[in-house]
Amino acid sequence: MKKLLCILLFVFSVQLLVAQTSQPAQTFHRDGKWSLGMRGGGNVWFNDFDTRKLSGGGEVYLRYGFTKKFSLGLMGTYDALQAGQKELDRSGLTPLQYDYIQTKGISANVVAWFHLTEGTRFSPYVYLGVGGYQYKRQVSAGAYYPIKKDYRTLHIPFGFGFDALWSRSVGFNFDIGARIMDDVTDNWKGNVPGENKVGIFDWYATGKVGLCFYFGSSGSDDNDFDGLTNSQEAQLGTDPIQPDTDGDGLKDGEEVNVTKTNPKNADTDEDGLKDGAEVQTYKTDPMKPDTDEDGLKDGDEINTHHTDPSKTDTDVDGLKDGDEVTRGTDPLKTDTDADGLLDGDEVLRRTDPLKPDSDGGSVSDGKEVANQTNPLNPNDDVPKPVLQPVEVGKALVLEGIVFGSGKATIDPASEETLMQAFNTLKDNPAIVVEIRGYTDNVGSRLRNIKLSQQRAEAVRSWLVHKGIDSQRIMAKGFGANTPIADNKTPEGRQKNRRIEFFRVK
């Protein structure tokens, strides 16, 4: 019997493992509210004797599920019970010796099952019942003890176990429990004479495995408790034993009656998010692929861009999230290029939201806007060098204009000073000037006048070439006249070799 029980337990464990690993890890319900079960296993009798022996038995039950977690039904059992007693060493008395004493009997019980979970292949339960047990008592020699007679006793079954569904109509059952009876099933009430122990009741522990079959569903039933009747599920093509046919996190009934989504499609709007996630987690519309209409699918917002699928402009920079992705800006940063302007403002100003200095003029777009310069014009980024204001009839020496010795060729080092003169004339179109050339006193007077005229003409030509109206500029050479320093020293002569900016108008 022990070997048989071990074999049954091993076979059951293997089949249960196969059932669990070969099916999807999703909600699962049996087919119908009725279940019929048959199981067999071993018993151990606890009574007034002192030696326990393993015996066998079987049970049949029929139950009906009134609710998702409560079933009521009938249980019938056939159990053999055995126990032994060692020899009593009592002086003057005949020793009491039994290799074993056994009972064989049947019981009928009303039992209530309380199911601890629902909707899974593995369904544990506890149970309690009450009934009667009818039995005969025998000893090891086969004789009835004390006489051939049917005895009856109260029978209280209780315990725990689980059903493991193989399919919608068949499952495995494993049960461990106890059965309480009165105290005379072993023909002794209280204790065996000579044994100093108190008797309360006889009982036996039992462990059994078997099969259960489910049946009895109707079109008006809701086998999987998803809010749709079996007939409705048949019309829709959903699974009547799976409350969430498409595994999207919403019960089929909720999809049909509340969210209006497709209970056979986990992602009704095909936006990359399951319907359940849209309803329960992200609060988006499972019927619209782009809930906030920003140009991005809800799934892309969550999984790729990490933006808010319920907000058109996640970073509040004036651009929709979809527009930002298209332009290459960051929909999570209000100022992608960190130039001091919001991405949306840059688009309105036609600057590049990906370049901090759109015109490449060395000043960021934000600073240009603050400075009221044009962020699309590189020429106004740095303030233009200009000459100091000069009054009409006054002259200003253009320091820094250099010529080759004895020549009228302008040295490149003069560029900065000439640009100041150019900017001044350009920004003040009403000004009319005379470019005056001077030399030191070295050389003849005529030569110096000619050289100074040539140098004044060279400066005038440079300005006209840059774009200044020729009518606004005159040139005249004065030679060594009107020195501003002593010609006796090299330093003085250097200062006297000059170009002056004389304002005529």
Image (tube, rainbow, N blue to C red):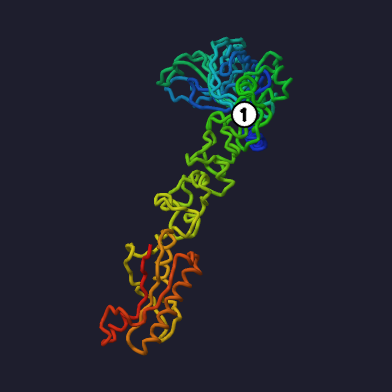
Disc 1 residue type (three-letter): Thr
| Residue found at x 51% / y 69% | 465
| Residue found at x 55% / y 10% | 153
Residue 489, percent from left and from top: 26, 87
Asked if residue 345 lies left or right of residue 490, the reply is right
Please identify the quarter of the rendering in which residue 479 is found.
Answer: bottom left
Quarter occupied by the N terminus: top right
Residue 404, percent from left and from top: 42, 84
Considering the numbered disc 1 on the image, is that residue within a helix, a strand or a loop? Answer: loop
Residue 23's place in the image compared with 157, above or below, is: below
Quarter occupied by the C terminus: bottom left
Q: Residue furthest front?
A: 446
Residue 434, percent from left and from top: 40, 69
| Residue found at x 42% / y 21% | 195
Please identify the quarter of the rendering in which residue 68 is found.
Answer: top right
**Label 1 neighbour load within 10 Å: few <14, some 14-19, many 20+:** some
Q: Which residue is mark 1?
A: 27
Asked if residue 415 lies left or right of residue 298, the reply is left
Q: Nearer the viewer, residue 228 or 457?
A: 457
Q: Nearer the viewer, residue 85 or 246?
A: 246
The answer to whether residue 3 is visible is no
Residue 413, percent from left and from top: 41, 76
Q: Nearer the viewer, residue 400 or 492?
A: 492
Q: Nearer the viewer, residue 262 or 12?
A: 262
- Count all numbered tags in the image, as a single digit: 1
The answer to whether residue 483 is visible is yes
